[in-house]
């Protein structure tokens, strides 16, 4: 043991520091020194605090004065913009990610998410209140820790809790008295209480007294120009009253309003309700699309007219299938948990079935359209427009375009794609064979090479007049060509 570490231990003993957590990992001496220093500094502060007032009051003071240091774990689509908002609100923010490339990029002033400009990262760095790291020993120095790690499904379509569990284990390892921990990842009701709380309390600190725990779901809608983290009200549920009060204070300067609910379970249920609402309503319009099409009725025209009703109706739009990290996944966190209570969730399962069947429906429509043109899908060349799961983003997670490309190739046709937001197809677990393919450039000549151009994602950067002018046939799953006046005979809705 180094002399410095012995000294640190002695000092801690002499101060009577209540540290149930010790670094047990093999880390470099430099990191040890940093860690020991951080622990010692924190220990001294805590001891002072315990004697001069409650931990809650101390943390409250720091939050009100924006003097708290905030750690955001998971610097992805949710965590990175949130870290920026905390920084803009005046907090000192440290982003943590297990992928060392992310902190490295951020420290160099580079964003890796298209709709978050590098300029924003550089401005945050200039304040000297933003940093990023993969060194989790620094968690001890944080007053608030916000967790934004992925919550996908396993191969058997059950909740994959490994990210939350691993992160909680790490937080538990470096937990010190006086911290607040908030989970933001979407998950089933009971996660904060049943999974996180026992892990965090395992070393002796008590929730609501020594540290504070809350759940506050993220409502981020990437690339939405009207609503971002700052102006979307934030639902907050705490394990205890103090937990709730402190969590609300943490977000008060960051979001327009907080919406308190009675428990972490309720807050978890709120997020699932919002996403299930979308999933079920999208399934409904997808089903209507198929039925109305058989009747010769255009579902998009129906929706445009229906949404003129000023009450009791909200428009949802059909598409080629569900994508993204939320809507195709989150509902199944509830269906899984419901089984523990002998409850069935037929509505949700049915919505999932309808939405999952949409790519197949698109392929059927494509086959029919080619037949009418005297061609077959076998041997055809198809250009899929848009690889991202929704318009104007670069996120391809669960994107139906990938499924469509795979289905097209299963029918012995060739599928290329064009997406200015996604230059190369990233590796995915479900579609490994597509990884590495490159986006085709749209030119009159390239468009003419394909038997069908399939509009899967209605990015604003596509010139639909140009596409319809030069393509031989356009299969439109998004009504993206609604404004095209010429060449309408080439357009088939699907
Ligand atoms: N993307 C959205 O639009 C959106 C919207 C609302 C809610 N959510 C929810 O927010 C959560 C995060 O989603 P996301 O889209 O930001 O995911 P993401 O994949 O973009 O980002 C997650 C980040 O966490 C990191 N990470 C994984 N394990 C880690 C660990 N153990 N420690 C530290 N970092 C770790 C990853 O490297 C990645 O950078 C999910 O629960 C998701 O359902 C997402």
Image (cartoon, rainbow, N blue to C red):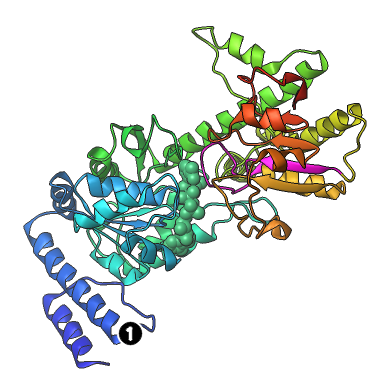
Residue 397 pos. (x, y %):
59, 49
On screen, 314 above or below 331?
above
**On the picture, is 300 further left or further right than 128?**
right
Q: Residue furthest left?
A: 52
Please state which of residues 43 and 14 is positioned toward the viewer in this rendering: 43
In which quadrant of the rendered image does the N terminus lie? bottom left
Determine if residue 180 is in view: no
Read off the residue under disc 1: 28
Q: Main secondary structure of the magenta part?
A: loop
Residue 224 pos. (x, y %):
44, 34
On screen, 63 above or below 284?
below
Q: Image point 35% across, 36% down: which residue?
A: 234
In which quadrant of the rendered image does the C terminus lie? top right
On screen, 363 above or below 77?
above
Q: Quadrant of residue 338?
A: top right
Please state which of residues 315 and 144 is positioned toward the viewer in this rendering: 315
Residue 24 pos. (x, y %):
37, 80
Q: Write down the region rendered in magenta.
A: 380-400
Please state which of residues 58 and 96 is positioned toward the viewer in this rendering: 96
Q: Image point 31% across, 76% down: which residue?
A: 22
């Amino acid at each position: 043991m180094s002399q410095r570490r012995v000294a640190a231990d002695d000092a801690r003993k002499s101060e009577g520091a209540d540290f149930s957590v010790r670094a047990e990992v093999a880390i470099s001496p430099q990191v040890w020194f940093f860690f020991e220093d951080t622990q010692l500094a924190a220990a001294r502060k805590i001891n002072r605090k315990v004697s001069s007032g409650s931990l809650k009051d101390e943390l409250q003071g720091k939050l009100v004065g924006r003097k708290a240091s905030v750690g955001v774990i998971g610097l992805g689509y949710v965590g990175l913009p949130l870290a920026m908002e905390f920084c803009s609100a005046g907090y000192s923010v440290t982003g943590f990610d297990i992928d060392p490339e992310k902190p490295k990029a951020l420290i160099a002033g580079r964003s890796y998410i298209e709709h978050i400009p590098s300029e924003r990262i550089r401005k945050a760095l200039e304040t000297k209140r933003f940093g990023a790291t993969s060194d989790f020993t620094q968690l001890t120095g944080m007053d608030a820790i916000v967790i934004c790690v992925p919550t996908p499904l396993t191969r058997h379509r059950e909740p994959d809790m490994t990210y939350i569990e691993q992160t909680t284990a790490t937080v538990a390892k470096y937990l010190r008295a006086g911290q607040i921990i908030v989970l933001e990842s979407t998950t089933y009701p009971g996660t904060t209480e049943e999974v996180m709380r026992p892990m965090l309390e395992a070393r002796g600190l008590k929730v609501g007294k020594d540290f504070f725990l809350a759940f506050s779901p993220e409502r981020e809608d990437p690339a939405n120009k009207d609503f971002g983290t700052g102006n979307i009200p934030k639902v907050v549920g705490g394990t205890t009253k103090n937990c709730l009060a402190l969590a609300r204070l943490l977000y008060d300067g960051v979001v327009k309003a907080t919406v308190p609910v009675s428990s972490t379970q309720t807050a978890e249920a709120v997020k699932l309700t919002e996403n299930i609402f979308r999933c079920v309503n999208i399934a409904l319009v997808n089903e209507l699309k198929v039925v109305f099409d058989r009747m010769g009725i255009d579902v998009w025209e129906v929706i445009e007219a229906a949404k003129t009703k000023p009450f009791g109706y909200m428009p949802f739009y059909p598409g080629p299938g569900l994508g993204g990290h939320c809507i195709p996944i989150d509902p199944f966190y509830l269906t899984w948990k419901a089984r523990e209570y002998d409850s069935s969730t037929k509505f949700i399962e049915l919505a999932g079935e309808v939405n999952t069947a949409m790519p197949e429906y698109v392929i059927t429509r494509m086959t029919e359209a080619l037949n009418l043109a005297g061609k077959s899908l076998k041997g055809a060349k198809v250009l899929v427009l848009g690889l991202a799961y929704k318009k104007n983003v670069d996120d391809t997670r669960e994107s139906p375009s990938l499924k469509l490309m795979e289905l097209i190739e299963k029918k012995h046709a060739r599928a290329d794609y064009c997406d200015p937001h996604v230059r190369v197809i990233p590796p995915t677990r479900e579609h490994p064979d597509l990884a590495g393919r490159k986006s085709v450039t749209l030119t009159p000549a390239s468009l003419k090479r394909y038997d069908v151009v399939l509009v899967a994602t209605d990015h604003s950067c596509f010139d639909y007049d140009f596409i319809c002018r030069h393509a031989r046939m356009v299969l439109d799953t998004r009504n993206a060509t609604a404004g095209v006046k010429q060449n309408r005979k080439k357009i088939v809705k699907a």
